[in-house]
């Protein structure tokens, strides 16, 4: 049990130093924070600005219905329609 917990402890300590996801921050409207994180992660300010622009453009627009898209075909499966033979 002691040795099995060691990798978990190492990962936990490593996760404490991880920044928030810039894409998640931008999705929550926290663009300034996303920019700060990208500036820390990228080599140049230009790279960070380009990536932030791409992230913001990829976000769903606020004029959309606001619902999340459903994976196609996931809810169309009908197990009762399949016949099984024993």
Image: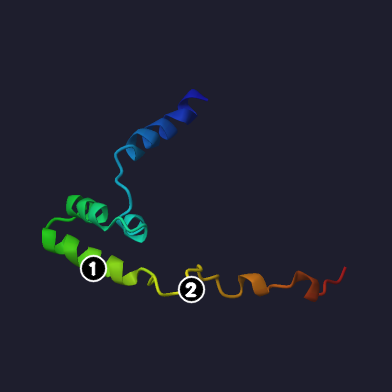
Give the x, y percent position of residue 60.
39, 70
Residue situated furthest right in the rendering: 86
Asked whether residue 82 is in view, the answer is no
Instruction: State the CA–CA distance, disc 1 to disc 2.
Output: 23 Å
Q: Which mark is residue 39?
A: none
Question: How many numbered circles does the render carry?
Answer: 2
Q: Residue at x 55, y 70 (%)?
A: 70
Residue situated furthest front in the rendering: 63
- Image position of 36 with respect to 79: above or below: above
Q: Considering depth in this image, is 39 or 43 the residue closer to the camera?
A: 39
Give the x, y percent position of residue 5.
47, 29
Q: Earlier in the sequence, mark 1 or mark 2?
A: 1
Label 1, residues with CA under 10 Å away: few <14, some 14-19, many ≥20: few
Q: Residue at x 69, y 72 (%)?
A: 77
Q: Residue at x 73, y 73 (%)?
A: 78
Q: Considering depth in this image, is 16 or 82 the residue closer to the camera?
A: 16
Q: According to the image, what is the colour scheme of the structure?
A: rainbow
Q: Which residue is mark 2?
A: 65
- Image position of 66 with respect to 4: above or below: below
- Image position of 44 with respect to 40: above or below: below
Q: Residue at x 38, y 37 (%)?
A: 11
Q: Which mark is residue 53?
A: 1
Residue situated furthest top in the rendering: 2
Looking at the rendered structure, the secondary structure element under dot 2 is: loop
Asked whether residue 8 is in view, the answer is yes
Looking at the rendered structure, the secondary structure element under dot 1 is: helix
Give the x, y percent position of residue 45.
12, 59
Q: Considering depth in this image, is 36 or 18 the residue closer to the camera?
A: 36
């Amino acid at each position: 049990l002691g040795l099995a917990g060691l990798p978990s402890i190492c990962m936990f300590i490593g996760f404490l130093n991880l920044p928030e996801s810039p894409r998640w921050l931008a999705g929550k409207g926290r663009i300034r924070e996303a920019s700060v994180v990208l500036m820390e992660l990228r080599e140049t300010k230009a790279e960070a600005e380009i990536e932030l622009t791409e992230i913001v453009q990829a976000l769903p627009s606020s004029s959309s219905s606001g619902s999340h898209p459903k994976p196609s075909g996931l809810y169309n499966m009908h197990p009762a329609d399949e016949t099984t033979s024993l």
